[in-house]
Image (tube, grey):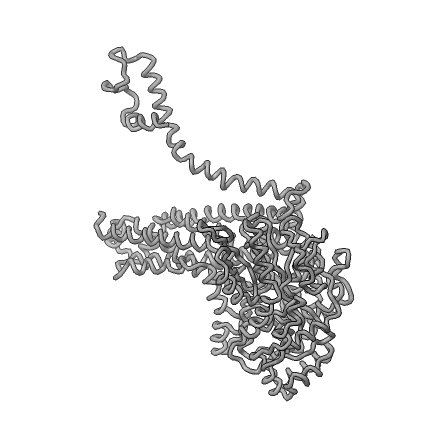
């Protein structure tokens, strides 16, 4: 029965099967290898986990060229939410985290509450490196510094001058700035715009707008003693504005960071968006080849700070001293200035803010706008630092989902709000 | 162990009488206590050895299968935080909370709907594919191997490709539908549409794999049966219904049970298909599944107690479906046999 031919077939198929299994096994195992460790030749590898765009690529090359004993590798993921899921899973597992983990600003209070999971990075030499209100966000209840601040997110308004022209609106960035001092002005201008250019929305996503508005509220979700209080007038006002604009066609109604959202940069999907410094790099990447982007030195309703991140060193790592050294180096003023030049992440370091490279910086993609000067002024316009407790990040996630339910029409605003309240309760 | 292994061959072939040439036989007065002891050993050996040989699997299963199952049950009756660890004993509170949670009911329905949309077409197509491949085709090996190709591709890559096909606004499928005058479909927002989209991803990956297993079963069917059926005047379809289907029944049961288990545990595809920040399966959990709820409880709300309770409920659901499917497929196969 068994001819040489069938035997060969079986051999071939079993070889193929083995190959399949090997590749799937490799695919499963990939990703969490080499998270730390020093190889035999005495070179320590330090991994740095980041999300979005930190502008570290050039810096890491620079470090690796000048250091033989410590090599730095970057682990990049798309969004903070993915990074957060990974962070908590591996925190619970007790292993697998990178030597340095970047934390998004809104999640920092929750990280500070994790006792013993992150190293105390306090270093007298670094006294006064950061803006005082930024430094405050890195201190836990015992006064230990848990993270080194990278950037801050002072917000301006990015806009498409070409689409403004199409709608008969002024295109000059100073004139545009004069038109959107308050949220009401901004929304009114948007209604005018969508009447003229019906296929294009006014802003990129309801979620993005919600973030921008929340960052102007003193106690968006929690009171100063960390009690959850989401039924407050200010939050309800933000909710009413964000969901009320959907029917007027002002929002793209796309989830921020989704494929469709990314594609909308290439399809004239919207005309304006709230732009913290670090968003400039994101816009430039997504809108590659699109001409007409500019940034106005204004933010409706006063200034606002959105995000800004921190580098932390998880205690589970094997090379804590080296990781501290690398984190301190990456967040030093000289380095942050270069990251700003690369991806627009606006420095949180006092010395960097005063440096010529930052104050005189321009951005070719944004029609040569003086981004250094604009963002510096935007930072000064920030008057409110919202109180964010340990639950902030989780509640924000539920809030964003609630906004999206109205966006995609699966619920009306009232139903969605009720579900948001239930979701918040379930956070326990 | 090694002693009993060595004696086994001899023992099974000529069981009761002691062999003359046996080196341990102590002479003509062979009915001494020793051989009897040996006999008893042999008999014991015959009875017990098979179990000893398969025991490593069961011991391993006890450690990696039963232990987690029991431990999950232990966790599910406590307050248990992801990072803080064990808290108070709360009895069945976690179960009550989960059963009372509207997301549980919704995600259970989603899971079953996605499971039906994926498993049913998947097995039907796999059977047809296998039957087609069971013919004398040119380049058989090539065809047989290429249907396994989607299985080799990682789910992440599949999700990226299908994600851009099923984009709500700028996706390829909606664009094509637009050309023939059909309104765009909300693949990520409409409940049923999203189930179809997720099920397509699952089918794409698993149909070929199941077809190959069924093909193996079909090849084991004796060709003589087909020859005599052909002589009796049975056509291809009749042969397929009356010979192939009943003959591959045991494999069918295997395929149905494994795809039931896999289908009810679906996680990677819907999670990667989701584009909202929370990744709970759409803004209103339109395509959130039970395993995604477990993940949400355990890792996003950091409550392992509720996560474990949900995992146990899922285990029960899978058992129910598994048994139901087993009974169903046995009946279907039996009917085919009687025809």
Residue A152 is left or right of residue A217, and the answer is left
Q: Is residue B248 above or below residue A60?
A: above
Please say whether residue B260 is visible from this viewpoint.
no
The answer to whether any part of residue B197 appears in the image is yes
Residues B257 and A68: in front is A68
Q: Position of residue A143 (x, y in %)?
A: 71, 53
Rendering coords of residue B261 (x, y %): 48, 50
The quadrant in which the N terminus of chain B is found is top left
Q: Is residue A33 left or right of residue B28?
A: right
x 53%, y 80%: residue: A290
Pick out the residue farthest to the top: B29
- Picture residue at 42% right of the left edge, 54% below the top: A24
Dividing the picture into quadrants, the one containing residue B41 is: top left
Where residue A236 sits, quadrant-wise, is: bottom right
Residue B157 point in image, percent of width and height: 45, 62
Using the image as rendered, state which of residue B119 and residue A140 is in the foreground: A140
Quadrant of residue B120 within the rendered picture: bottom left
Count the labels in the image. 0
Pick the front one: A305 or A25: A305
> x%, y% of residue B200?
47, 62
Furthest toward the bottom, the residue is: A168
Q: Nearer the viewer, residue B179 or A146?
A: A146
Above or below, A58 relative to A100: below
Drawn side of residue A236 relative to residue A306, left or right: right
């Amino acid at each position: 029965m068994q001819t040489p031919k069938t035997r060969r077939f079986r051999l071939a198929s079993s070889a193929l099967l083995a190959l399949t299994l090997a590749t799937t096994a490799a695919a499963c195992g990939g990703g969490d290898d080499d998270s730390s460790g020093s190889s035999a030749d005495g070179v320590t590898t330090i991994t740095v986990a980041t999300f979005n765009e930190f502008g570290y690529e050039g810096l890491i090359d620079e470090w690796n060229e000048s250091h033989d004993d410590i090599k730095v590798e970057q682990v990049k993921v798309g969004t903070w939410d993915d990074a957060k899921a990974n962070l908590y899973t591996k925190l619970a597992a007790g292993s697998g985290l990178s030597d340095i983990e970047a934390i998004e600003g809104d999640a920092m209070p929750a990280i500070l509450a994790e006792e013993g999971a992150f190293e105390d990075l306090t270093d007298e030499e670094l006294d006064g490196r950061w803006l005082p209100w930024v430094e405050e966000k890195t201190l836990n209840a015992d006064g230990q510094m848990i993270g080194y601040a990278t950037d801050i997110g002072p917000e301006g308004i990015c806009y498409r001058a070409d689409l403004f022209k199409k709608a008969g609106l002024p295109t000059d960035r100073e004139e545009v700035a004069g038109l959107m001092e308050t949220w009401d002005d901004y929304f009114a201008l948007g209604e005018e715009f969508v009447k003229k250019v019906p296929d294009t929305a006014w802003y990129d996503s309801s979620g993005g707008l919600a973030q921008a508005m929340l960052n102007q509220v003193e106690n968006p979700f929690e009171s100063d003693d960390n009690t959850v209080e989401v039924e407050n007038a200010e939050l309800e006002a933000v909710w009413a504005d964000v969901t009320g604009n959907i029917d007027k066609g002002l929002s793209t109604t796309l989830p921020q960071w989704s494929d469709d959202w990314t594609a909308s940069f290439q399809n004239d999907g919207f005309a304006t968006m709230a732009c913290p410094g670090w968003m400039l790099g994101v816009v430039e990447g997504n809108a590659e080849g699109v001409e007409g982007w500019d940034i106005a030195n204004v933010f409706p309703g006063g200034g606002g700070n959105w995000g800004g991140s921190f580098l932390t060193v998880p205690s589970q790592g094997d090379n804590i001293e080296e990781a501290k050294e690398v984190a301190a180096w990456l967040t030093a003023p000289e380095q942050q200035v270069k990251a700003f030049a690369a991806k627009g992440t606006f420095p949180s370091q006092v010395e960097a803010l005063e440096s010529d490279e930052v104050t005189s910086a321009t951005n070719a993609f944004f029609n040569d706008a003086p981004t250094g000067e604009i963002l510096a002024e935007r930072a000064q316009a920030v008057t409110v630092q919202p109180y964010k407790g340990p639950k902030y990040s989780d509640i924000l996630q539920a809030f964003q989902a609630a906004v999206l339910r109205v966006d995609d029409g699966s619920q009306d605003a009232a139903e969605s709000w009720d579900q948001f309240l239930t979701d918040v309760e379930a956070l326990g | 162990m090694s002693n009993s292994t060595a004696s086994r061959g001899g023992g099974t072939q000529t069981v009761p009488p002691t062999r003359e040439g046996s080196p341990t036989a102590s002479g003509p007065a062979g009915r001494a206590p020793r051989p009897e002891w040996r006999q008893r050993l042999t008999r014991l050996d015959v009875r017990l050895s098979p179990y000893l040989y398969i025991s490593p699997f069961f011991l391993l299963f006890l450690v990696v299968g039963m232990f987690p199952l029991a431990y999950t049950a232990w966790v599910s009756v406590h307050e248990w935080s992801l990072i803080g660890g064990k808290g108070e004993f709360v009895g069945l509170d976690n179960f009550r909370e989960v059963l009372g949670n509207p997301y549980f009911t919704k995600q259970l329905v989603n899971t079953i709907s996605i499971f039906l949309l994926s498993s049913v077409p998947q097995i039907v197509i796999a059977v047809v594919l296998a039957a087609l491949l069971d013919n004398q085709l040119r380049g058989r090996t090539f065809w047989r191997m290429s249907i396994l190709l989607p299985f080799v591709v990682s789910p992440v890559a599949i999700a990226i490709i299908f994600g851009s096909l099923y984009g709500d606004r700028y996706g390829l499928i909606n664009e094509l539908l637009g050309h023939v005058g059909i309104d765009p479909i909300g693949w990520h927002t409409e409940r049923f549409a999203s189930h179809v989209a997720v099920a397509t991803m699952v089918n794409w990956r698993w149909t070929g794999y199941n077809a190959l297993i069924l093909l193996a079963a079909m090849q084991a069917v004796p060709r003589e049966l087909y020859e005599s059926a052909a002589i009796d005047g049975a056509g291809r379809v009749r042969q397929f219904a009356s010979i192939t289907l009943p003959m591959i029944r045991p494999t069918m049961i295997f395929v149905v049970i494994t795809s039931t288990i896999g289908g009810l545990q679906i996680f990677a595809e819907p999670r990667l298909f989701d584009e909202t920040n929370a990744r709970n399966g759409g803004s209103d959990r339109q395509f959130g599944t039970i395993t995604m709820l477990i993940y949400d409880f355990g890792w996003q709300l950091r409550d392992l107690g509720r996560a474990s309770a949900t995992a146990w409920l899922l285990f029960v659901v899978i058992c129910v479906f598994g048994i139901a499917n087993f009974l169903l497929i046995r009946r279907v196969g039996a009917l085919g046999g009687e025809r």
